[in-house]
Image: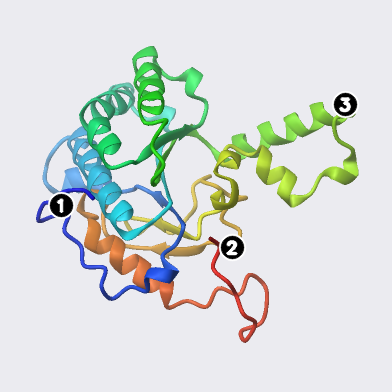
């Protein structure tokens, strides 16, 4: 597995290995506040947040998570100051250039969902290269939501379904929850497309247009920890909290609920 530094080191011994969430989705929030608390520019927080992505990726892979989806840049983030957006667009280039070799070594596959074709060319190239270079990896999927918004995701899925109906490829009666799910940007994840555990850092308690359809039955955890301070041990604690919950999916408490595999 990954070679853990002191900060990366985790102890998952208290966790039930049979109840590790298959898919964890994280809204990585608090980079700017982390920097401001240290009287640093906001971009310093984003830079440190990138290091946290590496740390948490290692921890999730080590614990046996199958999909880790990270909300890297939303369709609304374009409203931020131009300099900050430019820096955020440069982060995938730096991240993948430095981290992809280690991802390949440890069998982690990169995926990216969102309107990638609207990103700067250098960012697009870095994204496509990382996807190609890790395409043969069969371990955990590290899935970035980049220029992603859930309302956009749902709208595009609806438009595609309408087009299919217009050409008689499907009928109205064919439109089920499963069919809609398969047309969303997470559809490629198959049985793991819906997060089991969704986390938001920094103390904010809102979803911010992230995976609105997919998290219908996710366990939600909100933590005051700012993203740059999040680490492998924090992730372990979030999973421990998840394992204490009774996931009924609308059923009754005593109904047997099998873990998706």
3D distance between C-alphas at marks 3 and 2: 32 Å
3D distance between C-alphas at marks 2 and 1: 32 Å
Query: Dot 3 surroundings within 10 Å: few (below 14), some, or many (20 or more)?
Result: few
Given contact means CB atoms under 8 Å apart, are the residues at marks 3 and 1 in contact?
no
Lateral position of residue 131 relative to residue 12, left or right:
right
Residue on which disc 1 sits: 4
N-terminal of the pair, mark 3 or mark 2, is: 3
| Residue 39 visible in this rendered orientation of the protein | yes
| Residue 74 visible in this rendered orientation of the protein | no
Q: Nearer the viewer, residue 48 or 165?
A: 165
Q: Position of residue 173 (x, y in %)?
A: 89, 45
Q: Position of residue 242 (x, y in %)?
A: 42, 70
**As drawn, 85 above or below 202:** above
Residue on which disc 3 sits: 166
Residue at image coords 37%, 74%:
16
Query: Dot 2 surroundings within 10 Å: few (below 14), some, or many (20 or more)?
Result: some
**As drawn, 159 above or below 24:** above
Indicate the secondary structure of the residue bearing disc 2.
loop
Given contact means CB atoms under 8 Å apart, are the residues at marks 3 and 2 in contact?
no
3D distance between C-alphas at marks 3 and 1: 53 Å
Residue at image coords 23%, 50%:
1
User: Residue 217, which numbered label?
Assistant: 2
Q: Position of residue 179 (x, y in %)?
A: 74, 44
Lateral position of residue 57 relative to residue 217, left or right:
left
Q: How many marks?
A: 3
Q: Position of residue 48 (x, y in %)?
A: 19, 41
Given contact means CB atoms under 8 Å apart, are the residues at marks 2 and 1 in contact?
no
Q: Nearer the viewer, residue 175 or 211?
A: 175
Indicate the secondary structure of the residue bearing disc 1.
loop
Furthest toward the top, the residue is 121
């Amino acid at each position: 597995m990954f070679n853990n530094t002191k900060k990366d080191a985790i102890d998952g011994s208290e966790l039930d290995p049979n109840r590790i969430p298959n898919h964890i989705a994280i809204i990585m929030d608090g980079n700017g506040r982390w920097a401001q608390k240290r009287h640093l520019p906001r971009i310093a927080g984003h830079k440190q947040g990138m290091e946290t992505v590496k740390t948490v990726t290692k921890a999730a892979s080590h614990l046996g998570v199958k999909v880790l989806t990270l909300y890297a840049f939303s369709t609304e983030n374009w409203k931020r100051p131009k300099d900050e957006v430019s820096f955020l667009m440069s982060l995938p280039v730096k991240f993948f250039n430095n981290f992809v070799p280690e991802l390949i070594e440890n069998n982690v596959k990169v995926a990216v969902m969102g309107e990638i074709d609207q990103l700067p060319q250098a960012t697009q190239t870095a994204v496509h290269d990382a996807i190609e270079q890790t395409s043969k990896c069969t371990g955990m999927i590290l899935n970035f939501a980049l220029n992603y918004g859930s309302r956009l995701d749902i709208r595009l899925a609806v438009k595609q379904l309408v087009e299919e109906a217009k050409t008689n490829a499907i009928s109205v009666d064919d439109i089920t929850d499963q069919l809609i799910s398969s047309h969303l940007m997470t559809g490629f994840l198959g049985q793991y497309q819906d997060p089991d555990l969704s986390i938001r850092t920094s103390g904010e308690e809102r979803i911010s247009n992230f995976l609105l359809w997919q998290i219908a039955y996710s366990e939600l955890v909100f933590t005051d920890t700012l993203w740059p301070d999040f680490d492998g041990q924090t992730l372990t604690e979030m999973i421990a909290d998840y394992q204490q919950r009774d996931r009924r999916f609308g059923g009754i408490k005593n109904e047997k609920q099998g873990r998706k595999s």
